Image (cartoon, rainbow, N blue to C red):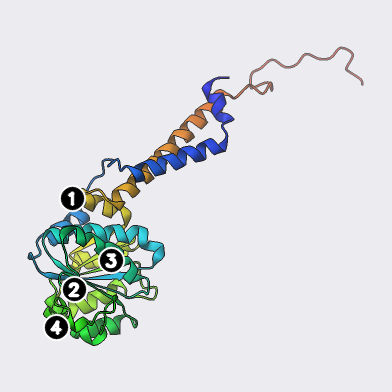
Amino acid sequence: MDIFEKLQDLDRRVFYLLMALAIAIPIIRPIGLPIDVTDPVKRTYDFVESLPNGSIVVMGFDYEPGDEIDLSPIAQAILHQLARKNIRVVALASFPAGPTFAEECLAVLEEYGYEYGKDYINLGHYAGGEPTLAAFANNPTSIFVRDWLGNDVASLPLMQEISSMKDFSMAMTLNDGPTGGTGTHEWVRQAVMAHNVPLIMGVTGVLAASNETYVQSGQCKGILAGLRAAAEYEQLIDRKGIGTTGMDAQSMAHMLIVIFVVLGNIGMFLSKKPSGRPGPGSPSRPAVPGGEGK
C-alpha cells in the first residue's frame, strides 16, 4: 500500500491532531507570515502618527463579547502607537461588557509608564446610546460621576483638562454595529459633525463596506476592519500581537486543509480501478452457443 492509499484510510483523529498543532504553534510562538499592508490601514496609521504628542483622545469600546477577537487586537495596536507619542486616553463603553475589554486593552499603556487618572482613564459603561454620547460630548462629567474603578471623575487630573468633545485631538470607536450600543453613524454625528473632532473606526469585517462612505467623504480619517487589519497594523508598529498570531493560525490551518484536499484527491484518482464494463468501441460479447430460441 503506497502513501496515497494510506491517506485514504487515515484516521480522522490524526487530522484533528494536526489541525490543533497548526493552530496552537503560531499562537504559542508567532511566525509572522508575510502580509501586505493595505491602503486603509496605512492611512489610519499615518493619521494617528500626525496627532500632537501629549494630546488626548477618546476611545469608545462599542462591541460585545462575540466580536472581541476582531476588535480588541485593533485597540491594542492603536494604543501602542498612542503610547509611543505620549498621547493620553479616555475610554468609555456603550455595552455593559465594554469596560472589561477596555481594561484589558488599556493594560498595554502600563508598559510605557502610564499612570491611571493622569495619563489614561476607563470611565465605564453608559446607557442610552446617542443621546448620552451627545451629553458626554457637551459635558463629560455630567454623564460620568464615577469611573469604572469607583473614583470621583471630577477629581482625576486628566478629566480636569476636558470640558467637552472639542478637547480631544481624535475620537475612535471600536464598533460591531447598531445592536444596542452606539453605532458608527452616531459617532460621526456627535464627534465629527457636532464638534469637528477627527474620527477613526475599528469595525468587524462585515461593516467595512457600509462605513466606507464616511472615509470617502472625509468624515472618517481611517478605518480598520477585522483581525487582518490588526495584523497589518502590528507590522507598521513593528510589534507582533494577537492580530499576527491570529492570522498566522488561520493561515496555517488553511494551508493544512489545502494540503489534505490535494493529497486526498490525488490518492482517490490513483486508486480508481477499471469497472470491467466495456467502453465505446469495445468488441461485443460473443454469443452463447445454443442461446437462440430460449
* Label 2 to label 4: alpha-carbon separation: 16 Å
Mark 1 or mark 2, whichever is nearer to me: 2
| In this view, the mark in front (4 or 1) | 4
Distance, label 1 to label 3, CA atoms, is 23 Å
- Disc 1 is placed on an element classified as helix
Q: Residue at 32% x, 42% y: name it.
A: 29
What residue does disc 4 label? 163
Distance from disc 2 to disc 3, alpha carbons, whole Å, reads 33 Å
Q: Nearer the viewer, residue 132 or 90?
A: 90
**Which comes before the other along the chain, label 1 or label 2?**
2
At label 3, the amino acid type is: Asn
Query: Which residue is the site of mark 3?
Result: 211
Q: Is residue 266 left or right of residue 89?
A: right
Q: Which residue is mark 2?
A: 117
Mark on residue 281? Answer: none
Nearer to the camera, 19 or 116: 116
